[in-house]
Every structure is written in C-alpha cells, then in structure tokens.
Amino acid sequence: MKLPKRKSNRLIGYDYSQYGAYFITICIKDRKKLLWQNVVGATFGRPIETSLSSIGKIVDTEIAKISDVYKNVTIKKYVIMPNHIHMIIVLQPDEGRRPQVAPTISRIIQQFKGSISKKLGFSIWQKSYYDHIIRNETEYQKIWEYIDTNPLKWEHDKYYT
C-alpha cells in the first residue's frame, strides 16, 4: 500500500535562514498538557495562577539558551501553554559569519526540541512545527498581542483538548 506524500508546512522556495521575524508554534505530542501545573478544565477557565510544570521549566530554560547557541537569533516574545509554545524568533545579520552557514529556522527548532528530549530521556514533541513569516510591523504587533493574550484564551485555543 502506497502512503500519501506528507505535505510540508514550509513555504516552498523560501530561505528560512533569511533575516527576518518568524512566528513559530511547537506542539506537544498527542496534545498532552505537560507544560503547566494545575491546568483547570474548560468549565473553570484558566487558573488564576498558573505555574510551569517541571517539563515546562526545562522548556523555559532551553528557550532562553537559543540566543546563546545562535548569536544572531533573538527570541523577542514567547509563551508556554499547557500543550504548545508560541515564539517570535528574529534572525539578524551576523557580521562574523558567512551567510552560507547561517542557521535556518528548522535547524534552530531541531536543536531546541532535541536538547529538551535529551534532558528528559524521551521526546514530548509532535513532529515538525508551524511557522509564519512575519512580513510587516502590523503582523508583528498582531502576533505579539496574540502571544500576550493566549493564556487568557486557553479554553478557546485551537490546541485545547
């Protein structure tokens, strides 16, 4: 039986090592709520005080390390949700490196997910990730606001289970 070819989530022909801003969403496998403690169900809404689980704290630490690993990469904004994360990643020119060795978004995400899997001893991640190339300041501001308000809308989020 021939399986259907998997459709790529990436924009065909786009160079993901290109300087710019990217909105990234990475989901937990099977949408398991592993990143927050005390996640209250939809009937109660978001808990007044949410805190990261031990896995969520590892994710938080590894997000902070991305800019250490890749000097020309900045995480401008992020939120850790119970079963996914959102980030705005900005790739900037790195004067000390040749353009052909610039990291791609895929490489950055692969390293990020791999480092967490290594620390845990197993993978928590869904295959791949979702990206959106941020094309202008208006999009940037809308995505920034979406990330800010995402925890408040948790029970209505499309990744909520």
Image (tube, rainbow, N blue to C red):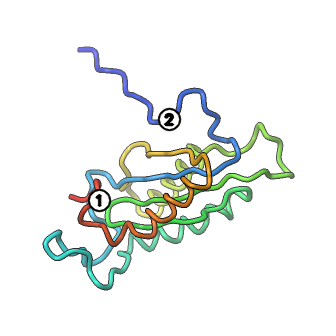
Closer to the camera, 92 or 5? Answer: 92
> Compared with residue 59, is residue 90 higher up or lower down, i.e. above or below?
above
Q: Classify mark 1: residues with Cα within 10 Å, few (<14), some (14-19) or many (20+).
A: few
Closer to the camera, 34 or 140? Answer: 140
First along the sequence among labels 2 and 1: 2
Residue 106, by quadrant, is: top right
Three-letter code, disc 2: Arg
Q: Where is residue 108 in the image (x, y as percent from the top left)?
A: 59, 50
Q: Which dot, 2 or 1, sits closer to the camera? A: 1
Q: Position of residue 132 (x, y in %)?
A: 51, 45
Q: Residue furthest left?
A: 43
Closer to the camera, 47 or 141? Answer: 141
Residue occupying the point 68% across, 64% down: 68
Q: Which residue in the structure is indicated by mark 2?
A: 10
Q: Position of residue 154 (x, y in %)?
A: 29, 66
Closer to the camera, 82 or 113? Answer: 82
Q: Is mark 2 on a helix, strand or loop?
A: loop
Disc assigned to residue 81: none
Disc assigned to residue 157: 1
Q: Is mark 1 on a helix, strand or loop?
A: loop
Quadrant for the C terminus in the image: bottom left
Q: Where is residue 13 in the image (x, y as percent from the top left)?
A: 59, 27
Q: How far apart are labels 2 and 1 at the CA level?
A: 22 Å
Tally the marks.
Answer: 2
Residue occupying the point 56% across, 44% down: 133
